């Protein structure tokens, strides 16, 4: 009996198609990565040593907006102008508008540091008084020096408020060379003299003398 012919199959043929590569030769079509866009920004206004950060906000025409209250931040020493811009790319670190100068982020929880304590000696010296002695005939008066009205801290353009300095106090006339009475400690005073020695001449000028502090 004749055998039926055997069918032969060709070996499988696999075709591999390579996808277009992700590399580039740097020619036409390349683009630089985009600059990171700030997630948040503030407009900071500086007044003296206080910096308040406001969130930029615009209202549609015809509507009223209720912007959030400003946040405080330590004033960066690198920025002296006002206003200036602060940005944050990640919500946790902040920079000036140049993107490289790091600053403390604005916060509602920020509390400015307390003022530096005044040196005790400076505070006592600032509280000690001085009176200028004036004479008229047989009478003498002591007027507080400097005049408190000349010590007013006014900004340019501020109106000058009315000021009535304390009236001079009548005192017992000190020696003629005494021009003032100075307080050296609380309620302890001595005389201040204008007597001195001429250049090149040796002399013995009068020393300060204890004296009662002027009182009304």
Image: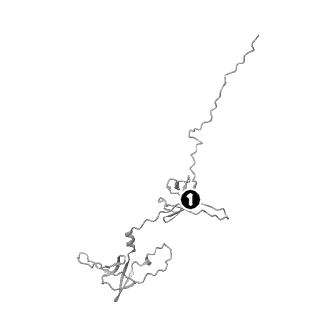
Residue at the right extreme, as displayed: 1
> Where on the picture, by quarter, is residue 57?
bottom right
As helix, strand or loop, the secondary structure at mark 1 comes to strand
**Percent x, y of residue 121:** 37, 69
Residue sitting at x 39%, y 71%: 123
* Residue positioned 55% across, 56% down in the render: 87
The residue that disc 1 covers is: 42
Residue at the farthest bottom position: 137
Up/down of 18 relative to 68, above or below = above
Camera-nearest residue between 171 and 31: 171
Residue at left 43%, top 78%?
148
Q: Nearer the viewer, residue 112 or 79?
A: 112
Q: Position of residue 75 (x, y in %)?
A: 49, 61
Q: Which quarter shows the C terminus?
A: bottom left
Apparent side of residue 166 relative to residue 208 in the rendered image (left or right): right
In the image, taking residue 121 as reference, residue 59 lies left or right, namely: right
Where residue 71 sits: x, y (%)?
A: 55, 61
């Amino acid at each position: 009996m004749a055998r039926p012919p055997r069918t032969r199959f060709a070996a499988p043929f696999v075709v591999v198609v390579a996808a277009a590569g992700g590399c580039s030769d740097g020619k036409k079509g390349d683009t630089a990565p985009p600059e990171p866009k700030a997630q948040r920004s503030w407009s900071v206004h500086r007044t003296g040593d206080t910096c308040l950060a406001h969130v930029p906000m615009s209202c549609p025409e015809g509507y009223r907006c209720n912007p959030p209250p400003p946040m405080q931040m330590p004033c960066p020493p690198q920025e002296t102008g006002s206003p200036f811009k602060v940005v944050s790319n990640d919500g946790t670190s902040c920079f000036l508008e140049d993107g490289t100068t790091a600053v403390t982020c604005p916060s509602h929880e920020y509390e400015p540091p307390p003022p530096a304590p005044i040196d005790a000696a400076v505070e006592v010296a600032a509280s000690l008084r001085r009176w200028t002695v004036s004479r008229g005939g047989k009478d003498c008066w002591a007027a507080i020096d400097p005049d408190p009205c000349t010590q007013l801290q006014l900004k340019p353009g501020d109106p000058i408020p009315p000021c009535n300095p304390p009236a001079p106090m009548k005192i017992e006339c000190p020696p003629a060379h005494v021009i003032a009475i100075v307080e050296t400690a609380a309620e302890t005073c001595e005389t201040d003299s204008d007597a001195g020695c001429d250049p090149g001449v040796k002399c013995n000028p009068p020393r300060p003398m204890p004296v009662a502090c002027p009182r009304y």
